[in-house]
Amino acid sequence: MGVKILLKKFVDVSGISGSEDNVRNLMKKELRGHVNKVYEDRVGNLISVKGNGKLKILLTAHMDEIGFIVKHINDKGFLKLNPLGGWDPKILLSQRVRIHTDKGTVNGVIGSKAIHMQEKEELEKAPKLKQLFVDIGADSKEDAEKMVKIGDYAEITGEFSELGSNRTAGRCFDNRISCVVLTEVMRRVKPKGSTLYGVGSVQEELGLKGATAAMFGVDPDVIISLDVGLAADPYTEDGEVSNKLGEGAIIEIQEYAFVVHKKVKKLLVETAKKNKIPYQLGVSSGGASEATKAILTREGKPGGLVGVPVRYMHSTVETADLKDIESAISLVTRAVENAGNYF
């Protein structure tokens, strides 16, 4: 199966933080027959195991996406939402919403005040999240409560689109791209003297919750987080972020609260060079991935991060290059197979 087809599969299922069931089930299905063991831990992480060597390597890729949860239904039947993860309110006006209920899905729209009714000051200001509402076609609170309830999950919808010959755009590329990378690595890798644990983790967008539990439970010797990384083009100024689409996987050197372990950096960089795999070095002043938790796991573990560059992060039109995804898969696969020479 091609990477593009697998990515579309992962993008087409819902997996908001705290409700990752559909992603977990898909990953489990795609891994069946390719790993020695796959199981779910107590908090909902999906853990697959391959190999039986002494060195324990853990890969993490969070399954959750940013979304919302219904927190209030007003007397007129409009919904108020609480964000799950980081949203930019500017992109939410006039977006379509899908609400997941016990009875199925309910469609809605985030309403926006018509331009004809706005004062000049309103046009120049971005809305606040608390000002936004969802219209599900209800005429009253009682009518709305027949369709949804407090605590139902809601996601912003968006089509999976092909851009040019190698690029794609869609929702929740953060972090379904890395779900693809993890799945493909677990399928292709042939561990040498190591045991590989692949973790599809929960609730990363709410503070790196699931990976913390998995790292403590597995107690690995080395940790590599799989995530997406910010692509500089076209908005950032020169020197702010250097990573670009089409130039390979990102070996992250620093993020907000974490610096890569020197042995992990050496493993990744030398593996890329030896196998002629395109890569970029990344230094970020913001954001945090599950790699941050490596140094806090038990007595501390050497950790690193391999990312795939993505434009327009945390939107419904996140954009990536399929070549970069393949680069990340190849880099991590070869690095895992070669890790015994470094640890």
Image (spheres, rainbow, N blue to C red):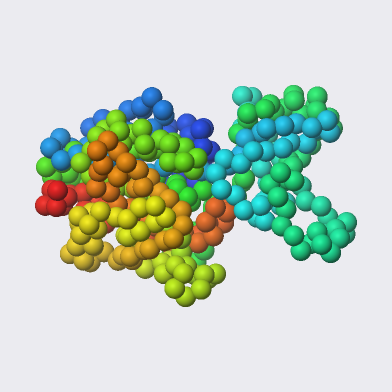
- Residue 300 is situated, as x and y percent measured from the top left of the image, at 26, 42
Q: Give the total of numbered labels.
A: 0
- Residue 336 is situated, as x and y percent measured from the top left of the image, at 21, 49
Hey, which quadrant is residue 268 in on the image?
Answer: bottom left
The residue that appears at 47% across and 37% down in the rendered structure is 203
Q: Is 326 positioned to the left or the right of 56 in the image?
A: right
- Residue 243 is situated, as x and y percent measured from the top left of the image, at 41, 67
Residue 26 can be seen in this image: no
The residue that appears at 83% across and 30% down in the rendered structure is 75
Q: Is 169 positioned to the left or the right of 299 in the image?
A: right
Name the outermost residue toward the bottom. 238
Hey, which quadrant is residue 324 in on the image?
Answer: bottom left
Residue 141 can be seen in this image: yes
Looking at the image, which is closer to me, 20 or 188?
A: 20
The residue that appears at 61% across and 46% down in the rendered structure is 157
Looking at the image, which is closer to me, 183 or 307?
A: 307
- Residue 269 is situated, as x and y percent measured from the top left of the image, at 23, 62
Q: Indicate whether 343 appears above or below 248.
A: above
Q: Is 32 positioned to the left or the right of 152 in the image?
A: left
Q: Indicate whether 276 appears above or below 8.
A: below
Q: Is 33 positioned to the left or the right of 44 in the image?
A: left
Looking at the image, which is closer to me, 288 or 323?
A: 288
Q: Indicate whether 190 appears above or below 146.
A: below
The residue that appears at 41% across and 29% down in the rendered structure is 44
Name the outermost residue toward the right. 117
